[in-house]
Image: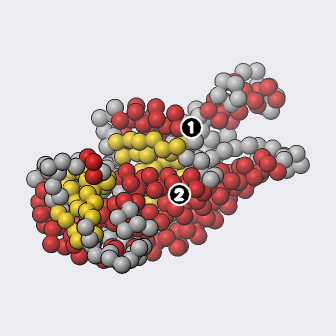
Amino acid sequence: MNALDPTIIAPLVRGLFLDALGLPVIVSSVLTEECNAEMVADLTMEADFSGTAAPDEEALALTLRGGLASAVDGSLKNWMEGKRRVTVGVSSGQSTSLFSVMAAGVSAPGAGLAGNQVLEGRVALVTGGAQGLGEEISRGLAAAGAYVFIADLNHAGAVALAAALRASPCCAGAAAIGVNVADEDSVAAMFDAVAAASGGLDLIVSNAGVLRAGSVLEQDEASFRSVTDINYTAFFFISKHGGRLLRRQRRTAPSWMTDIIQINSKSGLQGSNRNGAYAGSKFGSIGLVQSYALELVHYGIKVNAICPGNFFDGPLWSHPEKGLFVQYLAEGKVPGAKTIADVRAFYESKVPMGRGVEGADVMRALRYLVEQAYETGQALPVTGGQVMLN
């Protein structure tokens, strides 16, 4: 770890401002070649790292907190007077790194984050965020005023969606990141990129997932492992490396709460016929959610799951060639069905509320989990009454 590595320093700087302002901020490294005579740090924190190649994060945090103490009042004054952006210099010996600190939301210091504003300005990351339910979540976060990182294996789709979201008047910003959630190195690189670009995160939505149905008597090992790798093991990678980033900014923001939310499934609450690999990966993920909740609460990280019902309007069900509606009609799985509409009506009839889940339903649950400061380790059903907890 380099003493002035922005992936280490930026989250610590972000934490300082989260703690001082009580509002989300975006911290980004300012490259030396971008500096000019007018770019002078509003405050400079001296950090003596001499003789230490890889200083301890906690020691760095203590040094930076001490360096900021005398400048907090001035920084808050700048924010309240509308400047809402300062430059921070972190010095180590003969070297100084500059970081731009910018307010992410529109609320004033002390206004708090509640009700419809609970997501405003928060920096969020959504895996599998370029299509399907992930796209709905990305759009919902942007509409609520969040800064959204759209992380997806489909990088081109993520780039296109990020550009569309940046055009929204409410969105604090959006960026695309290519990632393979089943590869730990790719996940680690993703969180390093986020740390350098924004200084950290307030919300991680682990949404990427796959469904490959099949009888236990027929399914091959490769298919079973693929579902497990993406739905279960990937959540471990995301919680591990995302949790490290959230812990880092917590070192200088001891009262700032953050969230990891896994988008699970109603199949994580009850078995699914001829779909054991998927249900097993989702059941297992709830075990991870509960276990990580117990561990990470010590770093102010809440870990919860949302368990949606069937998203009939997404590509899994409604793709015109490969969707489940088309497959089930061709297979004669729904007795008497003659059209795709017949198949859809059959599955909608299984839901007491008469329809599949929609993006807005999941967003209400997500907003609740972020706003609820006294809940962690929960699996929240959003199924229209199809699955009810005891």
Q: Residues within 10 Å of mark 2 (few under 14, many from 20)?
A: some
- Give the image location of residue 173, x and y in percent: 34, 42
Quarter of the image that includes the N terminus: bottom left
Say which amino acid is labelled 2.
Ala
Instruction: From the image, tell me which residue sits under label 1.
Output: 154
- Give the image location of residue 215, x and y in percent: 84, 46
Residue beneath the point at 59% across and 38% down: 311
The reply, left or right, for residue 41 in relation to residue 336 is: left
Which element is circle 1 on? loop
Q: Residue furthest right?
A: 217
Residue beneath the point at 14% across and 49% down: 37
The reply, left or right, for residue 262 in relation to residue 116 is: right
Of pointers 2 and 1, the one earlier in the residue sequence: 1
Which element is circle 2 on? helix
CA separation, marks 2 and 1?
18 Å
Instruction: From the image, tell me which residue sits under label 2.
Output: 188
Q: Choose top left, top right, bottom left or bottom right for residue 248.
A: bottom left
Say which amino acid is labelled 1.
Asn
Residue beneath the point at 22% across and 68% down: 45
In this rendering, does residue 19 appear at all?
A: no
Quarter of the image that includes the C terminus: bottom right
The reply, left or right, for residue 371 in relation to residue 345 is: left
The front one of 357 and 350 is 357
- Give the image location of residue 135, x and y in percent: 50, 38
Q: Residues within 10 Å of mark 1 (few under 14, many from 20)?
A: some
- In the rendered image, the vertical position of residue 337 relative to residue 14, given as above or below: above
